[in-house]
Amino acid sequence: MAKRGPKRDLDRELRYWELLSLGLGTVEACRRVGVARKTGYRWRAELGGVIAKKPDSSGRYLSLFERQRLASLTAQGVGVRAIAARLGRSPSTVSRELSRNSRQWDSRYEPIVAHMRAHEQGRRPKAGKIESSPWLTTLIQSRLDKRWSPEQIHLYLRRHHGDQPDRQVCVETIYQSLYRPS
């Protein structure tokens, strides 16, 4: 079996991300946590240059950082309950994540693939309120053609159809329907 390199020190990596979020540069953050500058640049590149935030343990979904920590602890042979305690999550959450996203042929958990898969599955296939109502679509489009603003359309609907919730949309919904790719 090929050597995979040193184990990932996720506590040190978390401290690095905390320092970046406080405004320190990569070089200084790397110096303070005791890693090479190249390591800091690699960590940033792995997340697409975005500064990772410490996960909120009360959050509903696992973050990429939590998934990376899960992979590291699993590779070290740590049990599900111990991993759950370290992540501040329920053991059932950890167990479901591992069973849902581990490779079948070698039971290896890959955090980035799992995170991408979770992101894709989390998308809502449901059509929006405007798209699912021909009446709303026609009315809003006709008002936009007359150069009404979304605020004016919202107020018109509220004034003339205030007793019909299916004919009400907020300003943000109108803006989203304008800018959402079809």
Image: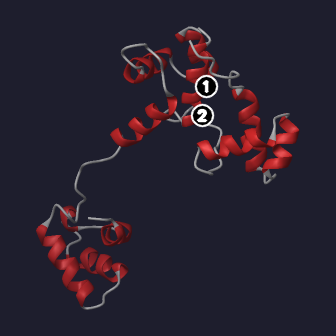
Q: In x, y percent, where is residue 144? A: 27, 84
Q: Residue at x 64, y 44 (%)?
A: 52
Q: Compare residues 115 and 132 and report the one nearer the observer.
A: 115
Residue 113, how many percent across, how many down?
Answer: 45, 33
Q: Tell me residue 90's x, y (percent).
A: 51, 19
Real-space Cα separation, disc 2 to disc 1, in angstroms = 6 Å
Q: Which residue is under mark 1?
A: 69
Q: Quadrant of residue 12?
A: top right
**Amino acid type shown at disc 1:** Arg
Badge 1 crowding class, 10 Å Cα cut-off, few under 14, some 14 to 19, many 20 or more, is: many
- Asked whether, in this view, residue 109 is left or right of residue 171, the answer is right
Read off the residue under disc 2: 65
Q: Residue at x 56, y 17 (%)?
A: 84
Residue 131 appears in the figure: yes
**In the structure shown, which secondary structural element does the residue marked by tag 2 occupy?**
helix
Q: Is residue 172 above or below residue 80?
A: below
Please determine whether, in this image, residue 117 is positioned above or below residue 158: above
Residue 88 visible, this angle: no
Few, some or many C-alpha atoms within 10 Å of disc 2 (few <14, some 14-19, many ≥20)? Answer: many
Q: Tell me the residue at 87%/39% (across/down).
A: 32
Q: Amino acid at mark 2?
A: Phe
The image shows residue 46, relative to residue 110, as above or below, that is: below
Colour mode? Answer: secondary structure
Q: Quadrant of the N terminus?
A: top right
Tag 1 secondary structure:
helix
